[in-house]
Image: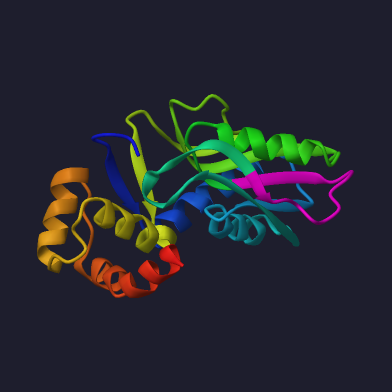
Amino acid sequence: MQNNFTAKIISLQEAYSVSHRLALDIMKSSVSFDIVIAVARGGMFPARLMCDFLNIGQLASMQIKHYQSGAEILKHTEIIDPITVDISGKKVLIVDDVNDTGETLIEAVNHVQSLKPALLKTAVLHEKKNTVFEADFSIERLDEWKWLVYEWAAAEDILNFLKNDGMLQQNIETIRDHLDKKYDLFIEHRLLHDILQMEQNYTFRTTS
């Protein structure tokens, strides 16, 4: 985990809006695609929206491990679930939520290229300036590094923050204050309440 980093919640509504803007940019490029490949798990939501907005009938995925939950980075990026459909000769759009270091996209592009597509492009909702590999399409570029907590992964990230900080047993208002002060992270009471209800399941899952 990076030291002294800040975080930001990306709500489902905001992710939907950014995905729509991303689809409009892709439409303006006049490039069409046969299949969308989601980079699981973060890219699943925006990838499905790309299929809907761009009228693309085929959706597949691959899973690449680069970060643990709670911004814990791994030493190596690896594909743990490769593409299982035939994409040779097809026009492929790879979709992920955020392009952070660029290592995930590099791994994804290399894997897809090995399967001999006719065309390959990449698209992300958010891109950070420190990336070593820029996506072909992106909507929001972050010049200041923040850990983006997408609402579809909020329980995983927030509970890891609290576990690492020894805050899981505190009351909800103390936790909200801690997240605000340490991570500059504002989180609605309702969302935090829902997340904390998942604590028992989360603890069991990560220690089994």
Can you give x and y, in whole percent of width and height, for residue 66 in the image?
53, 42
Can you tell which quarter of the image residue 73 is in?
top left
Residue at image x 11%, y 55%? Answer: 177
* Left or right: 71 as drawn, with respect to 84: left
Say if residue 29 shows up in the picture: no
Q: Which residues are magenta?
A: 79-95
* Left or right: 153 as drawn, with respect to 108: left
* Left or right: 83 as drawn, with respect to 21: right
Residue at image x 44%, y 68%? Answer: 205
- Measured along the vertical axis of the image, is residue 122 above or below residue 175? above
- Measured along the vertical axis of the image, is residue 192 above or below residue 50? below
Q: Is residue 86 magenta?
A: yes
Can you tell which quarter of the image residue 106 is in?
top right
Can you tell which quarter of the image residue 204 is in?
bottom left
Can you give x and y, in whole percent of width and height, for residue 76 in the image?
56, 36
Report the number of numbered marks: 0
Q: Is residue 88 magenta?
A: yes
Given the current orientation, which residue lies at the most extreme right position?
A: 89
Can you give x and y, in whole percent of width and height, for residue 136 in the image?
62, 33
For the N terminus, the image quarter is top left
Say if residue 89 shows up in the picture: yes
Given the current orientation, which residue lies at the most extreme front position?
A: 208
Can you give x and y, in whole percent of width and height, for residue 141 in the image?
43, 33
Residue at image x 25%, y 56%? Answer: 162
User: Front-most of 9 and 49?
Assistant: 9
